Image (tube, rainbow, N blue to C red):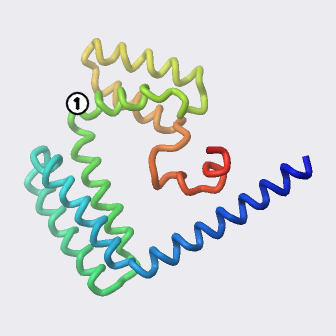
């Protein structure tokens, strides 16, 4: 047991050291990283989302991009908020699309290991399948939302770099 505690402590120290190195590299390259993140978000909107957006949403998105770009140019700290808003706009537009809700549901149920409550996951999965068969997409949206509430980790930024995930991995 003592050896395990020592190994765990040593691993946690290495994880902390790695996180500090990542933070330093990010700080040194912040402008370039922000440019890449903004470009990726804009490209996704233009290639995948704009066709489904209302004209007012497209204009609002373009205006938000300009604001985010100005934030990068002035090295302001509010860029992350602008980027989050842009990504939310992408999601909001897609969320109205029935095919997106169905695809999102299928994606979620393809990884049952990512859900905390296995019984609820099974119930929601079965209910979602029934809603797809009945073409009841509004109810399916509710199922997708409820699944997201019991999902452990939903992506790279949502926990991949947490020490517990690295040590367990």
Q: In this view, does 148 lie above or below 58?
A: above
Residue furthest right in the image: 2
Q: Position of residue 109 (x, y in %)?
A: 43, 26
Above or below: residue 165 compared with residue 149: below
Q: Is mark 1 on a helix, strand or loop?
A: helix
Where the C terminus falls, by quadrant? top right
Q: Quarter of the image holding residue 137?
A: top left
Q: Is residue 7 left or right of residue 49?
A: right
Residue closest to the eye, 139 or 150: 150
Q: Position of residue 148 (x, y in %)?
A: 46, 37
Does residue 67 appear to the left or right of 155 in the view shown?
left
Seen from this angle, which residue lies furthest bottom? 74
Q: Name the residue under label 1.
A: 98
Choose between 73 and 55: the one closer to the eye.
73
Residue drawn 36% across the image and 16% down it: 129
Determine whether 7 is above or below 99 in the image: below
In the image, residue 82 above or below residue 124: below
Residue lying at 88% horizontally and 51% vertically, measured from the top left: 3
**What residue is rendered at 33% in x and 79% in y?**
31
Occupied quadrant, residue 34: bottom left
- Horizontal and vertical percent position of residue 159: 54, 52
Q: Is residue 143 left or right of residue 37?
A: right
Q: Residues within 10 Å of mark 1 (few under 14, many from 20)?
A: some
Percent of width and height locating residue 160: 53, 52
Number of numbered discs: 1
């Amino acid at each position: 047991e003592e050896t395990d505690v020592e190994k765990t402590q040593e691993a946690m120290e290495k994880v902390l050291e790695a996180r500090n190195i990542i933070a330093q590299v990010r700080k040194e390259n912040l402008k370039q990283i922000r440019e890449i993140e903004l470009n990726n978000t804009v490209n996704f909107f233009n290639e995948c989302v704009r066709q489904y957006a209302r004209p007012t949403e497209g204009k609002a998105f373009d205006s938000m991009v300009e604001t985010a770009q100005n934030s990068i140019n002035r090295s302001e700290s509010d860029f992350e908020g602008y980027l989050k808003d842009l990504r939310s706009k992408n999601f909001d537009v897609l969320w109205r699309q029935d095919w997106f809700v169905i695809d999102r549901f299928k994606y979620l149920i393809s990884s049952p290991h990512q859900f905390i409550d296995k019984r609820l996951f099974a119930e929601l999965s079965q209910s979602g399948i029934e809603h797809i068969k009945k073409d009841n997409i509004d109810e399916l949206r509710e199922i997708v939302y409820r699944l997201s509430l019991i999902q452990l980790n939903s992506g790279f930024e949502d926990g991949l770099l947490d020490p517990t995930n690295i040590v367990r991995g």
